Amino acid sequence: MSYDNTCKYLAETYPQDFARWLLAGEVSEVEILKTELHLEPIRADAVIFLKVGNKILHLEFQTTPKSKTPLDFRMLDYYTRLKRQYWCEIQQVVIFLQATTSEMVFNSQYVDTNTIHKYRVIRMWEEEAASLLANPALLPLATLAKSDSPENLLTQVAAAVNTIESKKARDNISVCTQLLAGLRFNRNLLNQLFQEDIMEESWVYQDILQKGEQKGKRREALELILRQLKRRFGNIPARIEQQLPNLGLTQLEDLAEELLDFSQIDDLVKYMANIS
């Protein structure tokens, strides 16, 4: 299940609630930045940029700490791109969703020879549940919070979801709650506390599911193309290998057809230059 897409939906639907939670105070205008971060744009489903006043809040949700590009370096990369484009204060927060003992979730900085870049890390299993339970937009995350009795916490979340006045909001929050709670609880328990039919009927669920499927197809297409290129041409230029993950599913599918006509590596280089 696409847990990161669930978090992305919540943060983009309730940006002020997330900004208040993470910035620990009242916020006025919050704008969702649909930026591509020019210079080889980064594309990631779990990344959200919020413009809060004169600062940018960069959120990144992680189910697992592992990633192809090390997370600490990626945070530095995002920071420099954002700084170049907006030249304002930038606060970065990585939110790890699922409990793990991996050392990676305890790292909050990138360190290189002449560079130290720091960012904030939140491990949901260490977060107090009270503030999350008090905000309907954060109820899905509350299921992952610290608790001596996780099942009792889930019962509290379910009761809080049922108090949401708007049926549309209640159904959507319920769907997101069930999706994220799946990281911690089995389906049978969730079915006892939530209406199962909401999942099937909700457009939010269908949208998140579809995006998750698209992400899976894109990953498979990328892996196939890399295998084909390396088998045909051996080593490919590093800049091309770095550029390929930035392509969308349709672009990858087009490339899969075009590469059948490539006779040399220069054909690939020229093709990639034309779509960058």
Image: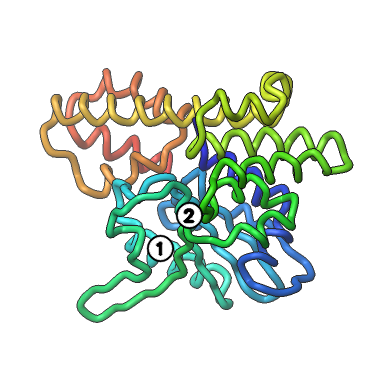
Give the image quarter of residue 198.
top right
| Residue at the far bottom in the pictured view | 114
Q: Position of residue 34 (x, y in %)?
A: 62, 52
Report the residue marked by disc 2: 125
Crowd around label 1: few <14 · some 14–19 · many ≥20 (10 Å):
many
Task: Tell me: residue 128, above or below residue 114.
Answer: above
Is residue 206 at least partly visible in the picture?
A: no
- Image point (36%, 43%), residue name: 273
Q: What kind of element bears circle 2?
A: helix
Q: Position of residue 102 (x, y in %)?
A: 29, 54
- Image point (49%, 71%), residue name: 84
Tell whether 69 sits left or right of 38.
left
Instruction: Give the amino acid at mark 1.
Output: Met
| Residue at the far left in the pictured view | 234
Q: Nearer the viewer, residue 130 or 136?
A: 130
Give the image quarter of residue 216.
top left
Q: Position of residue 266 (x, y in %)?
A: 21, 37
Task: Tell me: residue 216, above or below residue 124.
Answer: above
Give the distance between the C-alpha atoms of the residues marked 2 and 1, in whole angstroms: 22 Å
Q: First in sequence: mark 2 or mark 1?
A: 1
Crowd around label 2: few <14 · some 14–19 · many ≥20 (10 Å):
some
Q: What kind of element bears circle 1?
A: helix
Q: Nearer the viewer, residue 186 or 178?
A: 186
Q: What colour scheme governs how the chains and residues are painted in the rendered image of this protein?
A: rainbow
Report the residue marked by disc 1: 75
Instruction: Give the amino acid at mark 2.
Output: Trp
Q: Position of residue 6 (x, y in %)?
A: 59, 40
Is residue 101 at least partly visible in the picture?
A: yes
